[in-house]
Each structure stands twice: as structure tokens, then as C-alpha cells.
Image (cartoon, rainbow, N blue to C red):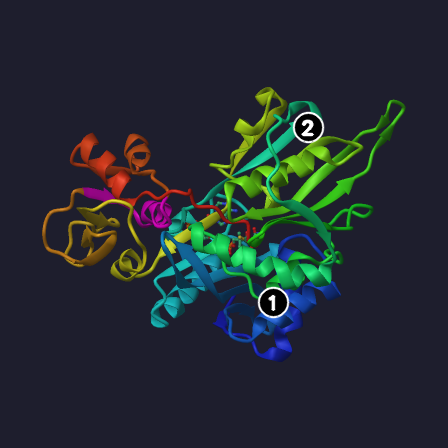
Amino acid sequence: MTLEFRPIRKEELRQFAGVNLTAFGEALDSWHEGWFESRFDGSTTVAAFDGAILVGSSMSMPVTVAVPGGTVAAAGVTAVGVLPTHRRRGILRQMMERLLQEASSQRLPLAVLWASEGGIYSRFGFGPAARSLGIELQHPKAAMMLRPRTGSMRLVSKEEAVEILPAVHDRVVSQRPAMIVRDRVGWHYALSEEDPHLPRGEAHLFIVVHETDLGPDGYLVYRIRPDWSPRGPENTLVVVEMAATDPAATAELWRYCTEVDLVRRIEANGRGSRPVDDPIWWLLDDPQAMVATMVTTLWARVLDVPALLEARRYQQDGAVTLGVGDSADEDGSRFRLEVEGGRGRCQPTKGPADIHLGWSELGSLSLGMPCLSQLVAAGRATASSQDLARRADALLGWGPAPWCFEDI
Ligand SMILES: CC(C)(COP(=O)(O)OP(=O)(O)OC[C@H]1O[C@@H](n2cnc3c(N)ncnc32)[C@H](O)[C@@H]1OP(=O)(O)O)[C@@H](O)C(=O)NCCC(=O)NCCS
């Protein structure tokens, strides 16, 4: 088997999309075809060919990702798939190496992706960098604590939503590491009722905006899963997406969910899943009405350590030397970070490392998750002392917690 790896030509896009969908066990349809067409220009593709047959797809889209206190341009790796006939022969490895090389040559400091299976990407230096809570709430009316209302809620059409929601989303991006800036194409797909993944009978999206005197500061997109039992209505309200710039607006959006009549259950999973610091647990009179599941969302791969650590901000001053990768003792693998006034200066150093960690673990730290002590406890990083690991957590960690619901 002689394999060739190269970017695809525009006329091969349909075949490329078909291979990707087949790898995921899905059929190519006009919705997916439209998505690939809208994302092709400006993206890097690497496809694998066995003779004339396309057998592997991968792609990297230009994205803007929030880091603590700012944003960076990044490679958004997506559309990764290999036909079942050609798996475990190194095709993904070859495609990924080419995508990461290309991203580095574009001087991008970071690559990000969502993983289908969590066991795949650590070997390529990606680490889980954001997580969310999937939430299920039973008998929501009884569970919610009464509190004074703030602002007002307004149901809006999809046409109004594409005018109002992006500004709120942009402000959330500016507050939350790991969020991904959403362009017009992204909004089109986020609010599409044609999405083949939406179950029939639940495809209608309701959109509600929370407003105060200062304007919109939160929105909720939801659908209703209908269920009528002999006891009457037992509908489920499915949160498709909820975002707010203010905790009071988040609380009002939750209140709205619980006040929709005929609903016995609320689900917030997938794109609707919530940041780990969401206030919902504290909004409940009966916290046992809620069950939360922690899920991994965005994976990050640091490509340029000094560029990334200088692009983000810090909530404390301090200094640390990181030794990264298997060759962390070799020159070029150690980086000295010095933070003053919340801004970092980072350069390669020949000095000894305070902390040794792998590329995947650095990826997990990169967006502000304060997980270094836990990585040390898990044996995935070493620190010269526990105290130093805790201080590094405080230096590299960020609040609010990283959160990403944009499944690129
Ligand atoms: C995941 C997928 C792309 C892997 O492609 P592949 O060409 O078989 O992968 P490779 O042969 O290059 O494997 C590279 C390494 O990853 C490992 N790997 C591959 N798929 C894996 C999986 N699903 N879980 C864990 N490890 C995996 C291989 O064992 C190999 O490990 P090693 O080289 O360190 O020993 C392919 O199985 C696929 O298309 N799956 C369905 C669609 C999908 O999940 N795509 C990923 C979207 S995020």
C-alpha cells in the first residue's frame, strides 16, 4: 500500500466530506456538504490517498480562542477520519504531523480540537483543557429557589437572534478562556433547525434573550422533547446553548427554564452543557434535584510556549521554570516565565526546571485550568515540592474556569 498525503483540490471536497462522514458512520447530506463548502476556503486540508482512492480526511480551520485575559489565533483541527478499511496503519499520525507542522509554520501558538474518543490525542501533545457540566434537573419548578427578578425575558425569532446574540457571545468570549469566537457561518449552523443530528419532532429551536436597561446580557436556545403520559405532560426542556455575561442573567435564564409550563425535566448536555462554576447548584432549593456529569470539551496543544504564555494574562505575579516534554532536560525545552503586573515574559532558559511535564499536560494548563497539583498527584508532572506546585497552580490558574461549547 503506497499512501500519498496532500491537500485536496476544491473538486475533491465532496469526496473528502464523504470519507469523513463514513468514518463517523454517517451519510453525506446537503447540510454537511454545505458545512464543508463554507469552511474550505482559508482552511488547511490533509487527505490520505491509497492510489486514486481518498481514505483519510483532516482539516485545520483558522479559529480565535480565548485565553486568560485575551484571545489567540489558533489551528482548529477538525474533520479527522480514516475509512474503516485503512485504520491503524499510521494514517492519522501522518495527517496530524502535517497539520501541526503547517500550524507551526504559520506561527500559530496553539492548536485545539474536540476529540471523539479521549484516548486518541494525548500522544500528539494535546491535553484536555476545558470541561463542562452536563446537568439534569428533575421537577424543576419545585427545585428552584425564589429570588427577586432582574431584567426581562424576550422570545426572539432566528432573524432577530443573529442580530442580538453575537454581541453577547463576544462578551462571554472576552470573559472565559477556551471559548471560540463564532463567525457568521458558525451562527448559521448553531441556529440551524435543518441539523440532521436534531431528533425529528424536537428540531424547533426557541430563542429567548435576557435584557436589562443596559441591553441584552444573556440568551438561551432550547428545544422541547414532548412526552404525554397518562398523568399528563412530562416534557423535557433541552438546553441547546445558554450564555450570559453576568451571573444574575445566568440565574434568570435558569429561572426561565424552570418556569416553562408542561416541563418535568431539564437537560443541559453537549453544546448546552455548563461551565464548572455555573451557579445552578446554589440556585436550587433542593440541590438533590440535580445530577451533574463532568465532561471533557476542548483539547489544546501548545505549539509555541513563549508566544502563548506571553499572549495570556495572569491573576497573580510570580515566576516558574517549566521543563516540557521527554527531553525536558535538554536545552530548548525549558522555559522561564516571569509575571509582573499580570503580564508574563517567557523565554527559553538553560536554568533548572521547577516543574517537569509533558506536552499534553502543558496543553491542559494552557487555558487556565488550575490542575498542576492534580497532575503532580497523578504522577503526570513532577514539581520540586508540593508547595511549588500549589504556587504554580495559583500563577497559571484563572477564574472564571475555562469553558467551551463550540464543537468545531
Ligand atoms: C480515530 C481515527 C482517525 C484513527 O485513525 P488511524 O489512521 O487508525 O490512526 P493511526 O493508525 O494513525 O494511529 C495513531 C495512534 O493513535 C492510536 N489510536 C488510533 N485511534 C485510536 C482510538 N480510537 N483510541 C485510542 N488510540 C487510538 C493508535 O493506536 C496509534 O497509536 P501509536 O502510534 O501511539 O501506537 C480513525 O480510527 C477514525 O476515523 N475513527 C472514527 C472517526 C473519529 O473518531 N475521528 C476522530 C475525530 S476527533
Q: Earlier in the sequence, mark 1 or mark 2?
A: 2
Circle 2 SS class: helix
- For the residue pair 217 and 376, the one nearer the viewer reads as 217
Which is more foreground, mark 1 or mark 2? Answer: 2
Whether ligand 1 has any atom under 8 Å from the Cβ at mark 1 is answered as no
Q: Return the x and y of residue 63 as percentages of the image width and height.
A: 48, 64
Find out whether residue 357 is within the magenta segment.
yes
What amino acid is labelled 2 in the image?
Pro
Q: Return the x and y of residue 382 as percentages of the image width and height.
A: 22, 37
How many other residues sit within 10 Å of disc 2, few (<14), some (14-19) or many (≥20)?
many
State the separation of the CA atoms marked 1 and 2: 34 Å
Residue 86: name its quadrant: bottom right
Q: Residue furthest right?
A: 230
* Residue 273, placed above or below residue 302: above
What amino acid is labelled 1 in the image?
Arg
* Residue 374, placed above or below residue 321: above
**Residue beneath label 2, please?**
140
Q: Residue furthest left?
A: 351
Q: Is residue 316 left or right of residue 368?
A: left
Q: Return the x and y of residue 369 as percentages of the image width and height.
A: 37, 42
Find out whether residue 137 is within the magenta segment.
no
Residue 184: which disc? 1
Magenta stretch: give its range: 355-368
| Residue drawn at point x = 39 percent, y = 67 percent | 103
* Residue 193, placed above or below residue 371: below
Residue 284: name its quadrant: top right
- From where the camera sits, is residue 301 visible? yes
